[in-house]
Image (cartoon, rainbow, N blue to C red):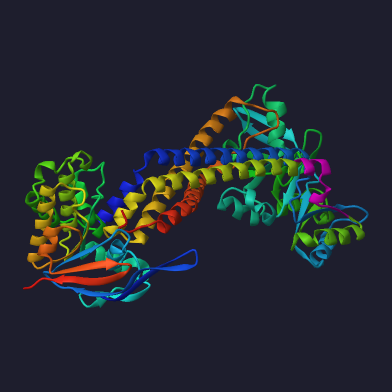
Amino acid sequence: MTEKIYLIIKECFSGRFVSIVVFIVTAAAAFSIGSFVIIVQSVENSVIRKFESAIPPGEIKVSRNTKELNGKSLAWLSGIKGVKAVYPLSASQIPMQAVISIFGLNYRTDLVCIGAPAEFVRADIEGAENRSDWLNWKPGMELPVLIPGILIEAYNNSMAEPNGLPEIKPDMAVGRELRIIFGKSSVKEIDGYSPELSRVAGFTDKIKSICLVIPLQAVKFYNNKFKDKTAGDSYISAYVLVESHKMLLGVAEKIEKAGLTAQTDKTLSEEMLSFKRKLESVFFLMTFIVFILALFSVIFSTMIAALHRMDYYRLLRVLGASRIFITISLLFKYSLIGFAGSFAGFIIMRSLLGIFISSLKIQGFEILMGNAGSADVWKAAGAGGLISFLAALPALFMVHSGKMNLDQ
Amino acid sequence: MLKLQNIKKYYKIAGLRKVILDDISFNLEKGEIISLTGKSGSGKTTLLNVISGLTRPSSGSVFLEGRKIKYFLDIMPSRMRNRKFGFVFQSFRLLPGETAWSNILLPARISGLITRKTLERAEEILEKLGLTEYKNTRTLLLSGGQKQRTALARALINDPDIILADEPTANLDSETAEEIHSFLVDFARAGKSVLVVTHNEYMFSHSDKIYSLADGNIKEMRKKVK
């Protein structure tokens, strides 16, 4: 067996020129496709953040119109056929202040809080402890807080620079403590106002308001405590999750008829949607062209290499190597080269894009490196290996359909 | 040792059946040398391909040590070629960029294991064939005779029972050809078998049987009187 492995390794180092070509082609493909994916996602993200209603597909944002949005209307919404879940949002209706110690300064500001159920913001809450606290929050417990991305953006774009403060990055803010004073603002103070210790549990783009997002039951509790009991049953909006996207418009129509306002992602500007679609099409086309070019380059390179080494494969076969062994040797070789090429291409892309990001700053545009994490490097390398594996099949077919016998 | 039973081989070319081998049957016993002769295109190499399991016969069977060769997944014929047969070709078929030693060990590598015994055997064969001093020389730099002796050493490394030689001396001078032939004769006298495609008189004179192939048909020309 060890000698067979030796022969496979030897095969990997044979035909070095073609191997280098395959390596470079897969590296270039991984570089290009990886860049395209990251750039298109970053552009889309910027478009969504700036222009979209932040309503995900398959969800309806419901707000009051002629009818109030309260416990009764929520129960009615839940009962509509095709509705999977209803997530109500409640706004604080009392004076409030937040005191944040940031960069050595005590920053105090009036604000509002929006209460959201744990299921609605679960994906944005960092850590199991924060998720558990959000779900089970009771008076007296430390309050987990989510910060809307729009708030951070507003701070970074309009406050940080004029005040000579550094920008806030999500990773440096999570876990930071702050105090929220319920019942007191710079203009009004209610007897018995209470400062509550809170901590940043993450960031969210689901709520696009200059506010802090806290557990729904906390908003209800403080509204009841400082206003009146009826305030706890009033909601500013609710997100209705439908069972399938097909049902979206039907459910939205029913809600509208009932006197509530229903907004879906269809309400997004048609121009922006069209721009987004065009952008996606252009990048898809570019990715497809790069993929096809890479695929054919690898196919032809492997075929040329196989043709050059035909005598060697014939000799191996005559001396007792099975077709299976020759197949494994060839496929292993090109899968390995494709894997290594894609790995290198992706790593280079990630490094260069990192340098590019740090040197380029466009207001409101941020390149998301989310798809270039460690796991994604392995995924890209695996995809490169698989493509080379598939691209080597025609060469393999050529080898096996050729004369593999004693003819001289 | 080796038995061919009603072997037929034909190819379809442009819808027409071209018969290459037509009902070939013979036995090769231990210690026997069979010489096979015939014109170019008479089917000699195809017959060697069928015997070694590289080509599947259209009909008929090949038996080795009483076992019928089965072609399923190519496993049995490959193992048989590697362990039971040694091959010698007219054009040597050596890896030119590699040393004589590396070429000789190739069948052992294909079998999956090189033991100390294999290496000792390789050294012995090299010495016997007068190749010790060329052990680390690339075969590209060897003379024709040295190349064929290297090929012969490669054929012997897995201690085969049968040597299949396809015109092994056609590219060699008479002196070297005689060396190779006498080596094949010695191999058979040691209880092994040789099937050689040849037109050489020396080989004919030492063969137990001589077969002639013409238009796919085999004919026994002469049997050695023992």
Q: Position of residue A85 (x, y in %)?
A: 74, 62
Question: Residue B147 versus residue A381: which sits nearer the camera?
Answer: B147
Q: Is residue A204 left or right of residue A405?
A: right
Look at the picture and state if A347 lies above or below A80. Answer: above
Q: Residue at x 69, y 41 (%)?
A: A282
The answer to whether residue B6 shows anywhere in this view is yes
Q: Residue at x 68, y 33 (%)?
A: A365
Q: Position of residue B98 (x, y in %)?
A: 24, 43
Is residue A346 shown in magenta?
A: no
Q: Is residue A169 left or right of residue A215?
A: left
Look at the picture and state if A163 lies above or below B139. Answer: above
Question: Residue A33 versus residue A141: which sits nearer the camera?
Answer: A33
Q: Is residue A23 left or right of residue B130?
A: right
Q: Position of residue A372 (x, y in %)?
A: 54, 41
- Magenta range is A261-275
Question: Residue B185 versus residue A228: which sits nearer the camera?
Answer: B185
Which quadrant of the structure image shows residue B68? bottom left
The answer to whether residue A182 shows anywhere in this view is no
In the rendered image, which quarter contains the N terminus of chain A? bottom left
Q: Is residue A377 left or right of residue A155?
A: left
Look at the picture and state if A300 lies above or below A166. Answer: below
Which quadrant of the structure image shows residue B214? bottom left
Q: What secondary structure do most residues of the magenta stretch adopt?
A: helix
Is residue A272 shown in magenta?
A: yes
Callout count? 0
Give the residue furthest to the right.
Answer: A66
Question: Residue A374 versus residue B167: which sits nearer the camera?
Answer: B167
Q: Position of residue B216 (x, y in %)?
A: 32, 69
